[in-house]
Image: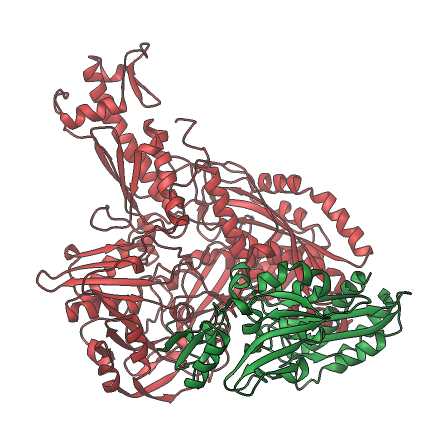
Amino acid sequence: MSASTFGSGIRRREDPRLITGTATYTDDIVLPGMLHAAMLRSPFAHARITSIDTSAAAEAPGVVAVYTGADTEGEIGPAPCAWLLPDSGLSIADYHCIAKDTARYVGDIVAVVVAESPHQAYDALDLIDVDYDMLDAIVEPKESAAEGAPQLHAEIEGNQAFHWTVTGGGDIGEAFESAAVVVKETIVQQRLIPNAMEPRAALASYTQATGELTLWNTTQNPHIVRFLMSLVVGIPEDRLRVIAPEVGGGFGSKIAVYPADFITVFCSKKLGVPVKWVETRSENYQATTHGRDHVQEIELAATSDGKIVGLRATVWAGMGAYLSTAAPGIPTILHGLMLSGVYDIPAIHEDVYGLYTNTTPVEAYRGAGRPEATFMVERLVDLLAAKLDIDPAEVRRRNFIPKFDNGHDVVTGLTYDSGDYDGALTKLLDKAGYDQLREEQVEARKQGRYIGLGLSTYVEICGLGPSQVAGAIGFQGGLWESAIVRFHPSGKVNVMIGASPHGQGEETTFAQIIAGELGVSPDDVKVIHGDTDNTPMGWGTYGSRTTAVGGAALALAARKIRDKAKVIAAHLLEAAVEDMEYEDGKFFVKGSPDSSKTIQDIALMANVAWNMPEGVEAGLEATTFYDPPNFVFPYGAHLARVEVDAETGSVTLQRYVAVDDCGPQINPVIVEGQVHGGIVQGIGQALWEEGVYDEDGQLLTGTMLDYAIPRADGLPDIEVHSTVTPSPHHPLGVKGIGEAGTIASTAAVYNAVIDALQPLGVSSVRMPLTPERVWRSIQAAQEDN
Amino acid sequence: MFAPQFDYYRAGSVAEAAALLAEHPEAKLLAGGHSLIPLLKLRLAAPSALVDIGRIDSLRSIREESGTIEIGALTTHSELASSELLRSRATALAEAAGMIGDPAVRNRGTIGGNVAHADPASDLPAVLACLGAEFRVTGGNGDRSVGASDFFEGLMSTAIGEGDILTSIGIPTVDSACGSAYAKFAHPASRYAVIGAAAALVVDEDGSCTCASVTLGGLVPAPVRATAVEEALVGTRLDAAAIASASGLTGDALDADDVLGDVYASAEYRRSVAQVWVQRALSSAAARCG
């Protein structure tokens, strides 16, 4: 590999167009004769629709059509749930794209207006007269499971979407009964609202003469959109082209294929002209999927010297009013299987109840299940440390899985690929100056200041995943990735990939992979993605899988090119193939490096094909479909230092130090950026973010005035370090890094705040840790004392 | 986020704006737009017309004349924050203006638009009330000057009547040693004040407090004077103990029924911790008396 390219922090080639505002997003695309759709959304969380009168709207200026659920009947099927979780009693309620007779969350679509301008479409929404009969609403997942709770779907008893369990290792009851120490906690993983820079959008252009549809869509996975769109609207896949142009972030919220996407396509198909729909930011808050929303009752059993003997949990996971595309797998497969964390835990049991509530559907949100798992485990470990009065770092060390480089089985059934958890923690404590920080804490406490240190040692599962496993866990698709590498006669390279990066930087890092494998300059490589007509099939960008799976496909395609190039080079140099050597883009006969053929020479010859070896095809191009043998398991150790102002309850994050291990780094600057962003999103959950519904199901945090996303002025400089442990099964040894920061940081900050409040007797505060919540817990603890 | 339909007029002068308002009684004045445009986009307001006064340059100035600092209604928050005159003579106002929103908001939002909107969570009303500001209004009801206590009538309600235009705001200057400050507990999303405390102090040659003005905003519908705190400070030397003790009387100014609460911070919490912000404003103001 060329040291100057693979592993170097070259600048992201995506950035000039993003920074200068010249990128093309879905909303930037204008087609001749294009109309605009606006969705009428239910203002009530649970209501029977008794009548809809669209006559006034239909006659409003510029309005071309108004459709209700009656018009779409038989034309578009329900929005599908595509993760059919096995052995869980999964009950999928029909998610009609336009509500038929009942609206089940604020934002459920009731009608659509198509007009000549978006303003006219939105004005006409006000003219649609809908009569609603109000029904009782339920918003909290645990309450939704209770007897007597309002029921969302007549055919689904107790609002239960599924009940999934994981049991592994020894007898869990026995572990708890015989344990010297048990610590328990109830945690609310509050609902979070993803805030991608670009709201969702769709532009559908259907040609009635040919039956062909082109759909521009803000999606993380255009090939999945094509697959599901074809099923739901009945356009054959070969005539359906989905393009994800520039996509301004997703964080999981652009995995799902949404009712509004299907409706936009329906409108274009019906009217025979292009129809664009762009959600407003208010709609984004109401109707684009949310994340988290768990109530977790958790407990840990241990010996008196702090060795964990069992972990048990019950989780009530709010799923919203309907099951979104990938929703059932998030609080289960991506959560429960990770409950061993970085520890050797001999017995684990978890029950997860997925519950319908009168709220926006809950889906993957950065980390998707793993932050909720890490938080549980890391919180319990800290509670154990506090109970036994052992330093939290030491309790972790006593329970770490020992260093391994080629597979370690945990009792939940996973095989971690490689890890050195103690190594990451040791580096963290060294970089942070942990002992010194503890001394400073003692001094601060003497002065009446409340300084806290929080640790989070995590491992996560990403690089989803082997397709055979996808099938076994009910994921209605494959989880392989593909890549085409094509050399042009001039030696320039096009790479076509099935994955669909939307801000992560793979246009740069994938060029670096090619550069590393084939010795070309990264500047000579263009990475093409996001268009189903000119990229090979792929399953999308989520779960930190693009580099972990798609990057592997690309590396293997490049190696196929190298093998073919070697045969051609041998022919041109009149040598035997087995005598050929390759180094840094050049092929030469062993011992004669001065007489060589460059990859560019070979590309030219392969393309003109004047003098090819016997039986070798023209062209220099390779395709790989890569199905990974296992997931990858990045890990690390994070530390936060906070100070709490006991007078007001406000928390200041003073320092944040991270050690992450994602294997060899293709571009360390991009890795650092991903770590920064991830950490900040996790801090957001700890300190600021919460999607709040009132008891009637009205979203109280429905704008950016109310919902607090992190801002730079609330954050310290993040200190980023790493260790390098290659994945044994990945061709480049790399693991994913997109979500690691988020998976680690919520627990680190939370643990720091509780550590700060320890002298005041506070051991639990509901997230986010707003000043009022912290202040109230201080007041309550003081009253108890 | 699409505003309802409205007509748009641009006024070249105050007189022209007044005439347009008289002609279109349902119209709203548009200055920097940072309060009005969001209301339109959320469809919480639907005026038939907007009269844009944003380019009337004569309304954009900060100058001192005969014992008063006169601030044109179209002066932006960033101009307030960076004004040397305000930083030295009405420090709390410059300080508060610098805490509004973010740079983009401060570069467009105006003092006049801000106070005319009279959002209880806004920073400037409390500061202007603290500094004894006079609000100059012209238009339908003739020219007049209104004091802060009369100007802010309640939640999003002011003495600006139909056809009126707020043209400038006057702040009296003090010749003796004085200092003022603003302390703010900002909402993490909106950056509006959950609690805002403004303090202005005057001291005599011995460093003894002769006059104190303390006003709270953010947690009440309209700015409230903390008179008990003010009275407790007069005659003290403004040391930490005196400030702490006086701040403890903050609750006297806050009728529990009037205190605002929301999903982020309850009324009870705001009322309980308001004294901390009063104490911080007083400490800064005292340090600036020199």
Q: Is residue A677 left or right of residue A178?
A: left
Most distant residue in the right direction: B206
Q: Check the image and report above or below for B71 versus A402.
A: below
In the rendered image, residue A265, in percent from the top left (x then y), is placed at 22, 66
| Camera-side residue of B87 and A82 | B87
Quarter of the figure with residue B4: bottom left
The colour scheme of the drawn protein is by chain
Percent position (x, y) of residue A680?
Answer: 54, 54
Quarter of the image that includes the C terminus of chain A = bottom right
Q: Which chain is red?
A: A
Q: Is residue A373 above or below residue A693?
A: above
Q: Nearer the viewer, residue B204 or A278?
A: B204
Q: Residue A719: image x %, image y %? A: 59, 44
In the image, taking residue A230 as reference, residue A713 lies left or right, namely right
Which of the pair B191/A477 is nearer the observer?
B191
Residue B113, quarter of the rendered image? bottom right
Give the side of residue A125 with respect to residue B189, left or right: left
Query: Which chain is depicted green?
Result: B
Question: What percent of the width, then of the height, locates residue A418?
Answer: 48, 40
Res. B157 image quadrant = bottom right
